[in-house]
Image: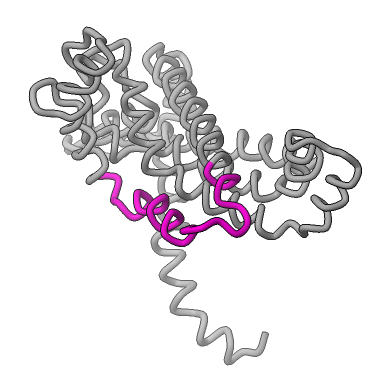
């Protein structure tokens, strides 16, 4: 690149460094120090004690378990629903543009609005789900959805899946439409069934769209904060307290900024490690 090109790019590079690189480096610095935000004591060196504190904290591992359940369930449901919708709209389907628009509308709803909307629908007195569908249509004796520790986490998963599945659907639909029809014609001539064509033609051609969809979905699920915060704030008790919710409490409720920074760095390494496994496994 010419020097003039770097001059044009410099403002964007400086802004990007200011909002991403500097906070990351400052978080790494704080993770090795003790700093109680609301106290006048200066920042003091802590070494690896913040990391040892988190790794020996049972609440941290409980929140990691709930994050794993939330992420795995959300990814599985989003992939199955997104793949089903993409297969249903593949090819020349009447009203395809209308259905595609309707299926993608939840993607444009802010997570905060999603949290408020689903919390209202789960309401046991006036909510469509909590007051009508579950007790009257399905006959389930559920007094309160978000107040029941056994089902509250899965209730937040449903809200997250509703909001995030359209992204998976769009990526998979684009991948399916990019597959040449000649592959399917050759498979039909060879007598392949619909399942065989899906397994041996569609899936191999979709490996990179699937990788992209699952990777985006994984990162979004692990870092999901807005919807869970609005719906339950980690409750009842700690039944929906994921890693991000717990980390937010450590940093901005207990004001232990050093411990909260170590928390963020551990979550970052967790996301990078599992994302690398996704890429290595699905790219084969």
Residue 112, placed above or below residue 64: below
User: Where residue 26 appears, x then y in whole percent?
Assistant: 41, 49
**Location of residue 40 by image quarter:** top left
Q: Is residue 186 or residue 124 the one in the foreground?
A: 186
Residue 269, placed above or below residue 12: above
Q: Is residue 254 or residue 188 the one in the foreground?
A: 188
Q: Can residue 34 be seen in this view?
A: no
Q: Indicate the quadrant containing the N terminus: top left, top right, bottom left or bottom right.
A: bottom right
- On the picture, is 122 further left or further right than 78? left
- On the picture, is 109 further left or further right than 96? left
Name the colour scheme: one colour
Q: Is residue 108 magenta?
A: yes
Identify the residue at horizontal 52%, vertical 33% (top origin): 75
Q: Is the magenta stretch mostly helix, strand or loop?
A: helix
Identify the residue at horizontal 39%, vertical 28% (top origin): 243
- On the picture, is 260 further left or further right than 231? right
User: Where residue 31 appears, x then y in whole percent?
Assistant: 42, 36
Q: Indicate the quadrant containing the C terminus: top left, top right, bottom left or bottom right.
A: top right
| Residue lying farthest to the right in this orientation | 190
**Location of residue 142 by image quarter:** top left
User: Where residue 36 appears, x then y in whole percent?
Assistant: 24, 33
User: Where residue 248 appears, x then y in whole percent?
Assistant: 29, 34
Q: Is residue 147 visible?
A: yes
| Residue lying farthest to the left in this orientation | 125
Identify the residue at horizontal 16%, vertical 11% (top origin): 143
Image: magenta residue range: 85-112
Residue 69, placed above or below residue 185: above
């Amino acid at each position: 690149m010419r020097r003039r090109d770097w001059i044009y790019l410099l403002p964007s590079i400086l802004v990007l460094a200011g909002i991403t690189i500097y906070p990351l480096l400052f978080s790494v610095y704080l993770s090795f120090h003790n700093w109680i935000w609301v106290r006048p004591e200066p920042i003091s060196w802590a070494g690896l004690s913040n990391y040892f504190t988190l790794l020996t904290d049972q609440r941290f591992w409980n929140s990691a378990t709930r994050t794993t359940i939330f992420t795995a369930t959300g990814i599985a449901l989003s992939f199955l629903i997104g793949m089903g919708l993409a297969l249903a709209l593949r090819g020349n389907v009447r009203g395809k543009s209308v259905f595609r628009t309707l299926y993608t509308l939840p993607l444009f709803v802010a997570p905060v609005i999603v949290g408020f909307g689903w919390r209202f629908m789960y309401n046991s007195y006036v909510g469509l789900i909590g007051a009508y569908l579950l007790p009257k249509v399905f006959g389930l004796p559920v007094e309160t959805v978000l107040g029941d520790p056994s089902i509250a986490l899965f209730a937040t998963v449903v809200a997250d899946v509703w909001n995030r599945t359209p992204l998976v659907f769009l990526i998979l639909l684009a991948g399916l439409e990019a597959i040449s029809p000649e592959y399917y014609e050759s498979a039909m001539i060879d007598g392949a069934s619909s399942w065989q064509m899906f397994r041996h033609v569609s899936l191999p051609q979709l490996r990179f769209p699937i990788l992209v969809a699952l990777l985006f979905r994984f990162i979004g699920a692990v870092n999901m904060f807005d919807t869970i915060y609005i719906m339950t704030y980690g409750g009842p008790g700690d039944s929906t307290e994921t890693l991000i919710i717990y980390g937010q409490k450590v940093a901005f409720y207990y004001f232990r900024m050093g411990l909260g920074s170590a928390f963020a760095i551990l979550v970052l390494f967790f996301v990078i490690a599992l994302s690398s496994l996704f890429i290595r496994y699905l790219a084969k």
